[in-house]
Image (cartoon, rainbow, N blue to C red):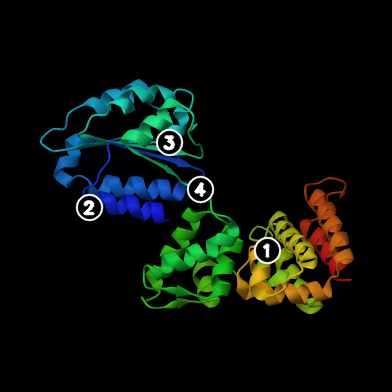
Amino acid sequence: MSDVSKIVSDIKNGNIKPIYFLMGEEPYYIDKISEFIESNILTEEEKGFNQMVLYGRDVTVEEISDNAKRFPMMADRQVVIVKEAQDLSRTIEKLVSYVENPQPSTILVICYKYKTLDKRKKLYKAIQKNGIVYNSKKLYENQVGEWIRRVLLGKNYKIETKAAVMLVEFLGNDLSKISNELNKLMVVLPKESTITPKDIEENIGISKDYNNFELRKAVGERNVYKVNMIINYFAKNQKANPIVVTISLLNSLFTQLLMYHSLKDTSKNSVARALKINPFFVSDYATAARNYPMRKVSQIIAFLREADVKSKGVGANALPSGDILKELLFKIIH
């Protein structure tokens, strides 16, 4: 995020490079940077003749070079943006001849999503010399809650920890989807608001009481009544609560419990670092570790693998996913 801020800040201050090669697994920041350049370099009057958007599937590398070599018309610069440039991955190295001698009045933006350039090859080295290479890396799920908090803070909002966890549980680490949902919340909630689980439930449709976060907590506490309430809700709402996601999250919980049992230092900060979790949740893991000794945890991981296979239709005689989940939770808790 700091790299993105620097790129945007440099552009605002007039420190503009002739080439921006935006690559990597996380499309969110690639889109943000290219959208900023598309909206802010040229005036509306200049854009008509001097700004073009190309798509990798429709052009060749030679055509990109030819367009980039043009001189601007009645403006100091022209902007050429190539979206979905990953479709040119087999021939992208041919761009090196242009990159080694770029047109100073052109800003060429290459959006190369889900892939990266080979750092050993000429193109990467040439862009580093004459432009900007930005590698947009995917966040781990345990980093997304903090990302949500920082994004909201920058827009004068706050969020309760449980509300952030609900978003991550529901949307994973897809920053574009999370950003869309946050924008919905910011439309209906006034600035300076603190977003609560109730806000998430009412405006996004994630149940604040019946979700994977609450299930994991109830399992950790061995709260049979609450576990049954949640899995019955899941069985009635299977589309919104796919079993594959629930099994994956429970597997994550018990894998982390195995790690917890092997720790010598179980202080709050030490556990948070080792398990890569928010310190807020350490007490939940301590409770779960008391309820599930290491031997039981190992047994549960075997149950989870068995349920995962059944959920994919192997050896389950086409059992409904709700029944597979009920059987799994019975084995875990008892």
Q: Earlier in the sequence, mark 4 or mark 2?
A: 2
Dot 4 surroundings within 10 Å: few (below 14), some, or many (20 or more)? Answer: some
Mark 4 or 2: the one toward you: 2
Q: Where is residue 214 in the image (x, y as percent from the top left)?
A: 68, 72
Sort mark 1 into few (<14), some (14-19) or many (20+) by Cα contacts within 10 Å.
some
Which mark is in front, 3 or 1? Answer: 1
Q: Which numbered disc, 4 or 1, marks the residue closer to the eye?
A: 1
Could you tell me which secondary element the residue under label 4 belongs to?
loop
- Which residue is under mark 1? 274
Q: Which amino acid does label 3 sit on?
A: Glu
Label 2 and label 3: CA atoms lie apart by 28 Å
Separation of residues labelled 1 and 2 (CA atoms): 41 Å
259 lies left or right of 316: left
Residue 254, position as x, y percentages in the image: 77, 63
Residue 330: percent from left, percent from top: 86, 68
Residue 13's disc is 2
What residue did someone put label 4 on? Answer: 137
What residue would you read off at disc 3? 84
Answer with left or right where residue 210 lies relative to residue 96.
Answer: right
Q: Residue 61 is drawn in which quadrant?
A: top left
Q: Distance between the residues labelled 4 and 1?
A: 22 Å
Q: Are marks 2 and 3 in contact (CB under 8 Å)?
A: no
